[in-house]
Image (cartoon, rainbow, N blue to C red):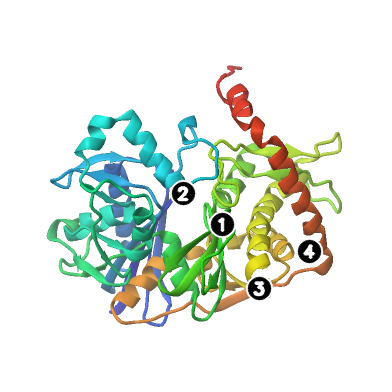
Amino acid sequence: MKTGFLGIDVGLSGTRAAVISAKGQVLTHARLAADTSRLSLTRLSALVDRTVRMALADRPNVSIAGVCICAFGPAPILLDDRGRVVAQLALFDTADSAQGDDGGDDLRQRFSVFRHKAPKLFARVRMVCDVTGYLVYRLTGRLTMDHVTAADYLQIRLPKRVALPDRQNADAHAGLLGVAAARRLGLPAGTPVAVGAYDSTADLVAAGFGQSCKSVVVLGTTMVLGVHTERPVADPRLRSTPHVGKGWFSGGWTNCAGATLTVADQLLAQGPATREFEVPMVWPYLAGERAPVWSPQATGLVAGLTTRTTATGLRHGFIRSIALSAADIAERLSSEFGAPRQWTVTGGGSRNTVLMSELADALGATLRVVRGADANLGPAVLAARSCGVKLSLPAARSYRANRGGHRAYGERLRVYRQVFEALRPLMPDIARVTQQEKVTV
């Protein structure tokens, strides 16, 4: 029987479970697709259970030494004085214009909107946890929060009556798997469970951020891009946060990446391959946008359509839009900290070789894709660390930038920024005239 470490990743597009050995070998994995941001906590918990049972059924001869669960966030869960759920706030609510469009902290705005709309419910709140903390509580009966997640909540100045759970390192033990939880997952009761963290925090750990690498791109449903710095970034459009290690993770979080590719797949049939085609410009602000525009009211845009535009060209425009968003953040970082010559890449989006080539050109650097990048191994790596086994994933393949391609991205980026800033004042009106009326055909 092989010993492994179970990692559970709750992303915006579904849940994943992976078991890795002490040498980083993937022993088994499973995935269930779902729009998790719209699921109730009960349904989300059931989906996690099913995913784990599916993964373990494939390899019944694996003994689990430790468990770690990591989820999307910050997505506040508000609890009363008995630990019961009062409310669950959305991760990034683009529908409520009360959030404004001033480049502020959307987490603070979400609390403000809830407090204004539901004052009686807010008065009952005594504790706040995140999705990871809630799911760990469900496994162990203990509420905890890692230091990286806590840093987000400490900035919003909660009322004194509202507490945060005990704060610990992400790879510390939160507790032991309870009897009921063990039965649901098909694991032995008493299995150690780690505190966990955001899924992006775990991805950074798996990529070796702050140790073997200093610049990382995480390509999940959303994109996280940043560099290791000794001081916080000064640019107000970017953010610096703690990570599992010394120094800062400085960069940005976008709402685009795999989500943009999914929309392209839904809207556009794959056209025939041609040697040359026009590529329109696409702004992938399909769910509002965080860094660097911080606009919950932003919507997607397409420019450069002509009678010669093909489905192939437009699909390529969607791919380039992700690379442009990455370049937008990276160029701002480079003005303060210099341009990295190499980026480590992880996440399911790394499977798209066209995107990876465009991303290398956009960043003007070599991309180093880690082994198992598309298997969401971050939580499993944290589970191993919680048991004293430190792993980082080696490189599996790389992509090099084309100089001419990088120069072309410089020109595209200039237009990309100027067009959005010119249209930004119109975003509320664009949303109003395009989203309120529903047409039946």
Whichever of labels 4 and 2 marks the residue nearer the N terminus, that label is: 2
Residue nearest the observer in this picture, 396 or 421: 421
User: Is residue 58 visible in this depiction of the protein?
Assistant: no
Closer to the observer: label 3 or label 4? Answer: 3
Q: CA distance from mark 4 to mark 2?
A: 31 Å
Give the image quarter of residue 154.
Answer: bottom left
Q: Which of the labelled discs sits on residue 238, or is there none?
A: 1
Question: In which quadrant will I find the N terminus?
Answer: bottom left
Q: Which of the labelled discs sits on residue 24, or is there none?
A: none
Report x, y in % for residue 214: 56, 75
Q: Which residue is mark 4?
A: 406
Report x, y in % for residue 90: 39, 41
- Residue drawn at point x = 59 percent, y = 63 percent: 350
Tag 4: amino acid: His
Question: In which quadrant will I find the C terminus?
Answer: top right
Closer to the observer: label 3 or label 2? Answer: 3
Left or right of 354, for residue 116: left
Q: Secondary structure at mark 2?
A: loop
Q: Residues within 10 Å of mark 2 (few under 14, many from 20)?
A: some
- Residue drawn at point x = 52 percent, y = 56 percent: 220
Q: Which residue is mark 2?
A: 13
Q: CA distance from mark 3 to mark 1?
A: 17 Å
User: Is residue 163 visible in this depiction of the protein?
Assistant: yes
Most distant residue in the top direction: 440
Whichever of labels 3 and 4 marks the residue nearer the N terminus, that label is: 3
Q: Which residue is mark 3?
A: 340
Whichever of labels 3 and 2 marks the residue nearer the N terminus, that label is: 2
